[in-house]
Image (spheres, rainbow, N blue to C red):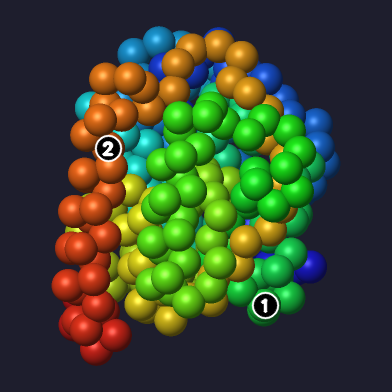
Amino acid sequence: MNQKVLVAIIAYNEEQNIRATIRDLLDSNIGYDVVLIDNGSYDRTTDIAKELGIPCISHFVNSGSSAGTLMTYFNYAYREGYEILCQFDGDGQHVATELPKLVDPIARDEADYVIGSRFLSKEGFQSYAIRRIGIRIFSRINSWIVGSKITDITSGARAYSRKVIEFFAKRYRHEVYDTNQLLLLSHFAGARILEVPVVMRERLHGTSEFNYINAPTYPAICLVNIVGTLLQKSAIKKGVL
């Protein structure tokens, strides 16, 4: 494979996890370039990344969720000429040796948007019971819209082709707020969607952005984003966004 591949680590205050996350990538010898997209951390996350030789792009303020890093890494990948882009969470849940499972279908021109699902092989960490309910509901909604089965809509293990990179860097000049919107926008732009089984770990330190405080409002936000994206469908297909 001779495509240029970038792994974008997204992180916010992950100083307890980021060293192990980066070492996992560096020690895996998969040969992909790495960049850290820091979402306004105020701890030593970026210091540690720089110590390990990883370039960093830092937001001046936190965007409010991990989705706020998407446009940053799409624009960086586009500007630097990458053909394949992977998201890799900085909390230590993703496994570096699983990345080729996401990259290879794109390299073989079989897909443009690949999701690493925890639920296809049912190995490794499967998330928490209450969160799995929400994942199942919104995965089914998205499956119905895109016409293919999605099981892990919130998965942060994702890879994108140059087609998707260019769409978000050149055509869609707006913010993206969650993975439902990201998937549907990509689908309406003509991306071929594929899920592959991956293994994930449980976070060792810190807490997830999804918690008991925002859990009651998150489904409503997801529905708003889905409806809003559906209203943009025609404009996206016409290329006027």
- Point out residue 17 in the picture as x, y percentages from the top left corner: 58, 17
Q: Secondary structure at mark 1?
A: loop
Q: Nearer the viewer, residue 145 or 96?
A: 145
Residue 179 visible in image? yes
Q: Secondary structure at mark 2?
A: helix
Q: Nearer the viewer, residue 54 or 239?
A: 239
Q: Is residue 119 left or right of residue 183?
A: right
Name the residue carrying label 1.
110
Amino acid carrying label 1: it is Glu
Residue 53 visible in image? no
- Point out residue 10 in the picture as x, y percentages from the top left corner: 47, 35
Amino acid carrying label 2: it is Tyr
Mark 2 to mark 1: distance in Å?
Answer: 33 Å
Label 1: few (<14), some (14–19) or many (≥20) C-alpha neighbours in 10 Å = few
Name the residue carrying label 2.
218
- Point out residue 162 in the picture as x, y percentages from the top left corner: 52, 71
Q: Is residue 141 left or right of residue 59?
A: right
Q: Is residue 124 above or below residue 29?
A: above
